[in-house]
Image (spheres, coloured by chain):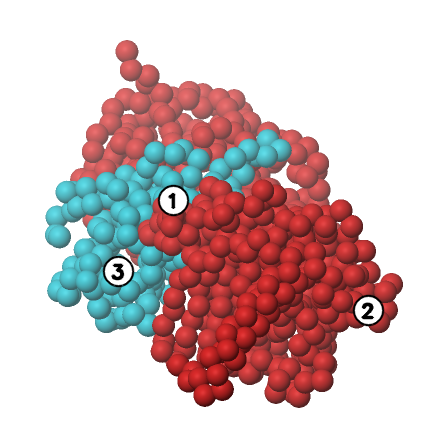
Amino acid sequence: MSDPHLKFVAPCQSFLDTSFFQELARLKLDVLKLDSAIKELTSSIGISHIPRGSPCAHLFLDSHSFGSRERKEGEMLIKGSLYNFNTIEEFKKVDKTRFLRDRADELWKEGIEDPNDCVKFSIISFADLKAFKFFYWVCVPCFQLDSLTASVRGSGPFKSTSKFDEWFAAHPGCWSCLVGESGELMEFNKVNSVRSSTLCMRDTSTVDMVPSALAKSFISLLKHFRSDLKEVRLIFIRSETASSFWVDTDMSSILAPDNTKLKVTGWERNLQNKLTPRAVDLSSLIDPLHVADQSLDLNLKLMKWRIAPEINLDIIKNTSVLLLGSGTLGCYVARVLLAWGVRKITFVDNGTVSFSNPVRQPLFTFNSCGKPKAAAAADSLREIFPLVEAEGVELAVPMIGHPITSESKQNEDYKRLLELIKAHDVVFLLMDSRETRWLPTVMGYAEDKIVINAALGFDSYLVMRHGNYETDQKADRLGCYFCQDVVAPSDSLTDRTLDQMCTVTRPGVALMAASQSVELLVSLLQHPMRNGGRPDEKVILGDLPHQIRGFLSEFKTLQLRVTAYEHCSACSSIIVEEFKSRGWDFVRDALNDYKTVEDLCGLSEVQLKAEEVMNDVLDEWDDDGEDGELL
Amino acid sequence: MIPLGEFREQLQALIPVLQLWPKCLSVHASLNGEALIGLAEHPTLAFYTYEFEIGYSQTYQEPRLIFKIWEATTEQGAELQRPCFPADLSRLMNVQDFSIGLDHLHEARKDSWFSVHACDTSHIVGSVKHHYLKRWASVYLSLFDPCFSNTYLFVDDV
């Protein structure tokens, strides 16, 4: 047996735009502060564009809801109130039942004067402005006289809606109307009620033959106006006219005298259909740093999704990089690392930004001149992407062949450099002299770090990765920057002219070398053995060369491979083990006299043998006679 | 490409189509009438909803789709909605070959939205102006719901 009682759907579903909360935050900060005064709101219920999947119309609130607004076609304006609490505890402690009843009592009194005023909404809220979280709960109170029972006698679709559509169009502020004895439509109020037993309402429900709960309020008001009324025809007009319908109800229940006790519903259910408050967390929208972080990640992930699904972006992001040299190479390398998502970059340099630097070194501007390079580069990188962990360290890398002038200072620099190398996963050697690269090369081997080397000529460049260190030197171990030398690096700067000291290059060379050095690193990181990947292997991004030499005059690059030299002044095991065991003492000896390194690694002997061979050749030439022809 | 005037006219005709989409929770025109703003639920994941806006790109002279993803959790007894920036958009959406960036700063709301880049739109949608926006929607809104184009089975004038 079907339930004879009239069923109802929630009158509307609220949608609060983020601009509503932004305006609330502004009001709270600038106007309300700790004031708990009730704030009047104006909103609209969209009655014409209700999607098929939604059971009722929508109540829209945005920043404009705090002021007055004009009604647009297809919507009903609705007034409301905001009750904002200063703490979450106050918000939680609100007696929700009492609150709803109080609002319903207010609407009942207003409805007696004008039934169209009984449709309003209220919002309780708490704005946590530190965390940018907003807690709220919307209610649209719908009341019914406690002693009133309305049972259904009959119902059916209502086709002749045109008269009602025209009337409502002409009375945009009216939710309801009465049908008089002659079929004329009139406003619903106490006076007109005596002449009508047909109540017509705009219906915000979309459920077939089930009206919205707003009907309870209008029915109760009609019964209050006409306590003698036994039967009422209710007509529910919807924007989709085909679903408009009528219901005949029995209202013969007798009201107690002066009975205005109300049953109330109205708290909005959440998306899970539960009666709980709602909240919105806008911290990620309002905090631009968070948005910048997500944006960079998304950019890289697009590459992963669309081009190279197997690429490991996390390993790049989590790699910490030390840049020794903050000049042209250092600046360009840092930019490309940033574009790849590297988040920890440390610059090391002992110079200051000179006036010629900014045009070639993209992390500096005119205003940077005079500032320490490493710090200025780090500051600039943070301006580009605030979430990068960029640090600048002013440090002079001790150079082999440059005798010690201040042992305590240089010892400090040595220790600091070693600490930095230990603390990072990758070291880029981007300095402007050969001898500066020696100590970091040895340290890089001792600490088993990935070392990427980039060096520039006028129109050529070298980019290479140092091979892995192994104590038992295998024949095919990849070499380092110094493996092709038969002399240890020494002082190349003293007693040189300016043009001999500075690296003069075509401006485009540094950019090419820097970008290739970073791309080489990224490719290496894709290999499961990282720097253990061999040059004849491939990874998801392609080749894993040992050395890349570029020649700008011919616009060409070559991939080369150099095996480790057993007598190398930097990566031979005897040098690395000596460094590991003696540390600063060994380094101090090398700084003071590069020949100690040559003696240790066997280069002195190689040079001696080379000299002997040369002498033999010259002796042979002498034996052939003075007129011997050199071919 | 579609001129702005034509876009405005066809925008209104798109509303009934979106209303028929089962996943659409709400749709309404913006205050200036030059965009549609909507909410749609995720086709399979109950705790995700999309907030989208169909506007016009003056640069490309094409429809412009921007969106936010909202995720629902519970905090302090309340149902909490927060914007979601997933590590892998393809896990949540039908990304296909769309180029998507988190790079649109909303003019009015001053917050960040995902945007679907409008290059290649003409190539995808075709050059016929009649029902341009409906055809555009049938492709681009499949980002949110791969079955979106089934909505057109219930649309009379396509």
User: Judging from the image, what is the letter of the chain drawn in red?
Assistant: A
> Which residue in the structure is indicated by mark 3?
B11
Q: Are marks 3 and 2 in contact (CB under 8 Å)?
A: no
Disc on res. A404 = 2
Task: Please identify the residue farthest to the top as the structure is shown.
Answer: A1
Dot 2 falls on a residue whose secondary structure is loop
Frontmost of labels 3 and 1 is 1
Colour-to-chain, cyan? B
| Residue A517 % position (x, y) | 49, 62
Amino acid of disc 1: Glu
- The amino acid marked with disc number 2 is Ile
- Counting residues from the start of the chain, the first of labels 1 and 2 encountered is 1
Instruction: Residue A310: give its label.
Output: 1
At horizontal 33% and vertical 51% (from top left) the residue drawn is A306
Dot 1 crowding, Cα within 10 Å, few <14, some 14–19, many 20+: few
* Rendering coords of residue A192 (x, y %): 38, 43
Front residue of A36 and A297: A297
- Going by the numbered disc 3, the residue's amino acid type is Leu
Q: Chain of mark 1?
A: A
Q: Is residue A577 in sight in this rendering?
A: yes
> Picture coordinates of residue A446 (x, y %)?
66, 49
Q: Nearer the viewer, residue A126 or A558?
A: A558
Q: Quadrant of residue A150?
A: top left
Cα separation between marks 3 and 2: 77 Å
Co-location on one chain, circles 3 and 2? no
